[in-house]
Image (cartoon, helix red, strand yellow):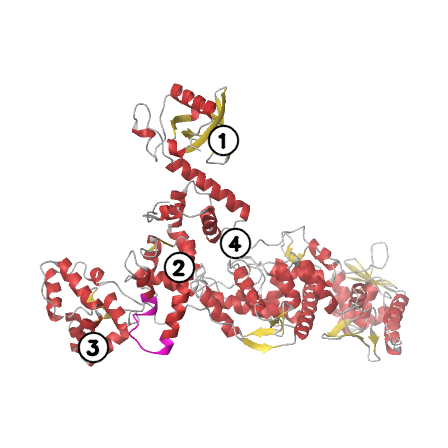
Amino acid sequence: MGTTTPPRTLAEALRARGDESLAGLLRARPDLLNPVPNDITQLATRASTRASVVRAVEHLDRFALQTAEALAVAPDPAPYDTLLSLLTGDGLDDGAQCDDVGAAVTAALPGALATLREQALVWGEDERLRLVRTARELLAPSPQHPSPTGLGPTVAEATAGMSPGRLQEILVASGLPATHDPVSAVAALSALFTDRTRMAQLLDTAPVEALSVLDRLVWGPPYGEVTPNPTPPVKWLRDRGLLLPVSTRTVVLPREAALHLRAGRAHRVPEPVPPVVAAAAERDPQAVDRAAAGQAFTALSTVEELLKLWNGGGPAILRAGGLSVRELKRAAAALEVAEPIAAFWVELAYAAGLLATDGESDERYAPTPAYDEWLDLSAQDRWTHLATAWLPATRVPGLVGGQDAKGRALSALGPELDRSAAPEVRRRVLALFAEPPPGTAPDPETLLRRLRWERPLRGSSPSGESTDLRSRLALWTLNEAELLGITGRGALSSQARALLDEGEDAAAALLAPLLPEPLDHVLLQADLTAVAPGPLERPLAEALSVLADVESKGGATVYRFTPGSVRRALDAGQAAADLHAFLAAHSRTPVPQPLSYLIDDVARRHGHLRIGAASAYVRCDDEAVLNEILADRRSTGLRLRRLAPTVLASQADPGYLLEALREMGYAPAAESAEGDVLITRAGARRTPPRTPPTPVPEGPPVPDTTLLGAAVRAIRAGDTAATVVRKESPEGAAGARTSDALPRTTSAETLATVQAAAMTGSAVWIGYVNAEGAASQRVIAPVRVEGGFVTAYDHTADEVRTFALHRITGVAELAEDEQG
């Protein structure tokens, strides 16, 4: 084995990697796969583009980012020891705490460098570490974009364009001998600032006020404004080059001087170790599971109640899209929750595909056909459906009520609520919840610190929101997880752990025993109420919701019977005898006499009056009742007149007339054109089949193992085609040997060469132009040549292909050491 030549470019460094390492790069940066690079050189070029580098840097944790920032202010290339010194300091500051941080940095730096190397942000051997040029431009300090380290430009950068005479004046003021040219002057000044002993001696002569100025600039920003006649301390610093001019009114502390004042550290506080997520409380795991199951059942009831509220057609859609503030308030009042929580339930139903727009001209929200299918599922399966819809959703209900970049209000179900980072934050928060033992409730503040360490640059959004969006997403996740029953009493439930690790079936199996069994009975009270001591079976709950009004909800639901609710049941086609039988069958207590009297009294008067279309008419066999209506002053606005002893006509709408007479204390029933009583059973309005909203991806999906393997093989094969050594053509044509040009041979030479390769089983290099006119280089092993086509194994594509002879621009044999 010979000695390995150090890579001179990023492409050479990538070419030296193994297949597993290349697959790791493509897995960490999936944007490099779209489309698959032709070869290693193209992969390196794509990995150095600004957009790709920005995306990769945004995914670094805080210490890996600090390592990259330190490399950005280090010499290029930088030895490993120089990088370590920038992160730990030069060891001249005292204190056990500094020693502990230095030991932690020393232990963590190899891992951070490995991460940067894996993502192709750093390349080169330890003695010549290089940060990718685009990353250096991104992280290095400049007047327009100060470095996160707070360091300024080097002496050489800050003095570029300074007059030679001024440089010599600075050298003399600093106690240095004059030089003959600006280059040596800059070198001498840089050497002074990097010499700890001489620099300390220089600063010992500085006025105290000058040292105070340096203290304000040392940790950044390193720029300051000066007047045309600066104060003596500032003048002292400027004369000695400790403050160098950037413009007529701005000076900067050069990097070398700042590093001396910082004891060699690029960062004030290196953070090599992720913050520990502390425990806020220790709960009984069974109590956590029971609390989460109870909240899960509440979530199911709330979503069902919301969609039942909009069962006959929900609110209209705003012109700009979404739900109006007034409709959100109505939903919140009906659900007895705050408006932000109501927005969460609305968005959850939408994400789960249970709610959508109906697509009519007067477009409204309504339940989808999937809602009916969801209702038929068991309670535990309904919950897993909601939970699995919540996890990948990119719509963020917490933004409702805020404003977009143009100052427009963000509404529930409206546009501009997608945040592509939400699913990753949601899953990471739950993963941190799952790390401690069951029953442990993590401290939210330490959890947020951990998230900020893991993604310090993440969180900004196109709408111009705060860069701390990631923390806001985490806080919303904590609240939503508790509402949905993912967590209970601040700790992750067992069923949620199963959902994350094993899937829906395992979660449903754990949740099922914890959910209350539906009851088939209620307890009727003498005060015209019924108490449901738990959740009711669906047919009983639906029938009771028609016959009575919900008075209070909670562990037990209280229903109240009123004349209006009984009339609603009669309007739905029930007879008094049906209602008596229903109550007797489902009550564990005797039917109270007042309730029986109420049903009989309303039923006796129900339908006694008949309403039809005249515009409207009132029909009654009892003339005295019609006389009473005509004599009632409240009926004046109905413009009633008698058509017959038992019939009154009105110009009012039948529906309005029906409600008006009910408000007057009567119990009329609507009548059809055939004279039959109309049954006004509540109809269910459904949208056409709708698919749930598709989450907005944050970037290209992470490729699976199969795709990664195929991509690596294709890149390797393309690299072989691009870098393979070719034999010189018989004429010595340069085109046959140039790696970046297609070979050129005559048709006869091309045919003869591929025929010979087919007979000997050897590989050749060809240039090929496909039907779309795209040119490429390929290494092929011809198998058969006939009918104007070459059938060959294409090493570039790793498969057998057929090539048209007339599209081959030229062919060249491979060098002997490249065969096989």
Disc 3 or 4, which lies upstream in sequence?
3
405 or 637: which is nearer to us? 405
Q: Find out whether the residues at labels 1 and 4 contact each other: C-beta distance under 8 Å.
A: no
Q: Residue at x 67, y 61 (%)?
A: 384
- What's the CA distance linking mark 3 and mark 1? 74 Å
Q: Tell me the element at label 4.
A: loop
Mark sitting on residue 113: 2
Closer mark to the observer between disc 1 and disc 4: 1
Closer mark to the observer between disc 2 and disc 3: 2
Q: Which residue matches tag 4?
A: 697
Q: Tell me the element at label 1.
A: strand
In the image: residue 91, left or right of residue 32 = left
Q: Position of residue 318 (x, y in %)?
A: 57, 59
- What's the CA distance linking mark 4 and mark 2? 29 Å
Neighbours of disc 4 within 10 Å: few (<14), some (14-19), many (20+): some
In the image, the segment drawn in magenta is: 85-98
Amino acid residing under circle 2? Leu
Disc 2 or 3, which lies upstream in sequence?
2
- Report if residue 525 is visible in the image: yes
Q: Which residue matches tag 3?
A: 210
Disc 2 or 1, which lies upstream in sequence?
2
Closer mark to the observer between disc 4 and disc 2: 2
